[in-house]
Image: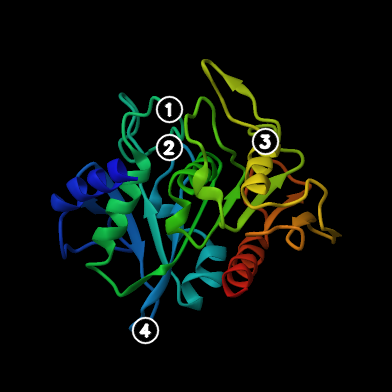
Amino acid sequence: MRLLLALITAWTAGAAVAQDCGPDAPCDIDGGSYYLNLPEGDGPHPVLIWFHGANSNGGSIHRSGGLQRDFLDQGYALLAPNGQTRAGRNPERFFFPGRDGSGRNDVAFTFAALADAESHGNLDTSRLYASGFSAGGSMAWLLACEAGDRLSGMVSVAGALRQPNSTDCSGLVDLPIMQVHGFADGQVPLEGRGIRDWHQGSVWTALERARNANGCHSKPDQIDIDEDFRSRVWDVSCTRAPVRIDLHDGGHGLPPGWTGRAKTFLENAHSS
């Protein structure tokens, strides 16, 4: 944690302050850039950190009707860091490695972006949540593992904790965790898949780490099935925070209705 704070301090010291950026233009700081969308009102606003998928950018927060309807319009600030660039690729398309060997400490960069964002809006960092899609969902897992003590909850969509990864996931203790995943996902299968010298990681293994960190039984406390999702929930048996997975029948994507379910989970877990 001391190393993380030192990196954040170093990045923040060189960050651009009070620049003209936000919904339509990225905010540039040392090490990269991020997008910020502030809700109406004076705040302080709870914050949802959103990690985009591979070959995309943080501007995706402005193209998501669900994030706007269920978070921005409900008073949440949306902070979307841009990932890392790749040599020879489109400079407006980024990625989050989410594993050891990364060229940038994305966890430290995320908090440097958050510190800079506080100069643009009145943010309530005591209500800080993280989410992301695909590679961004894997990044949300990494952020939770390494700095979950600074978060109030995490929701990963179609991503898992990648390997190799040396994190001990101590940040999962006391952190509400929700996974949304497609049963037919072949891009990021529930079991993950090997790609060259790394592995996407297993959703089941990541959830097991979350349950162990929060003192949950291995058997779900509740199983719910509706028209759109099949849910397995660990809450009553947990001595710390709840864990759940919501499966849908689709493949690799953002299923309709996920944002409303995620917001309900995060707020219920925060208030309990």
Q: In what quadrant of the picture does the C terminus appear?
A: bottom right
Tag of residue 205 = 3
**SS for callout 1:** loop
Could you tell which of marks 1 and 3 lies nearer the N-terminus?
1
Label 3 Cα crowd, 10 Å radius (few <14 / some 14-19 / many 20+): some
Q: How far is mark 2 from mark 1, CA to CA?
A: 11 Å
Residue 65 screen position, x and y as percent: 54, 64
Q: Position of residue 243 (x, y in %)?
A: 68, 54
| Disc 2, SS | loop
Q: Amino acid at mark 1?
A: Asp
Could you say which disc has been placed on residue 100 in the image? 1
Of the image marks 1 and 4, the number of the one nearer the N terminus: 4
Give how far apart the Cα atoms at labels 1 and 4 are.
Answer: 40 Å
Label 4 vs label 3, nearer the camera: 3
Residue type, label 4? Gly
User: Which residue is at the front of the view, 59 or 6?
Assistant: 6
**Residue picked out by circle 4:** 41
Mark 3 vs mark 2: which is more N-terminal?
2
Residue 217's spot in the image, x, y percent?
A: 77, 50
Residue 96 tag number: 2
Q: Are marks 4 and 3 in contact (CB under 8 Å)?
A: no
Name which of mark 4 and mark 2 comes first in the sequence: 4
Question: Residue at 27% of width from left, 48% of height from top?
Answer: 5
Neighbour class for label 1 at 10 Å: few (<14), some, many (≥20)?
some
Q: Amino acid at mark 3?
A: Thr
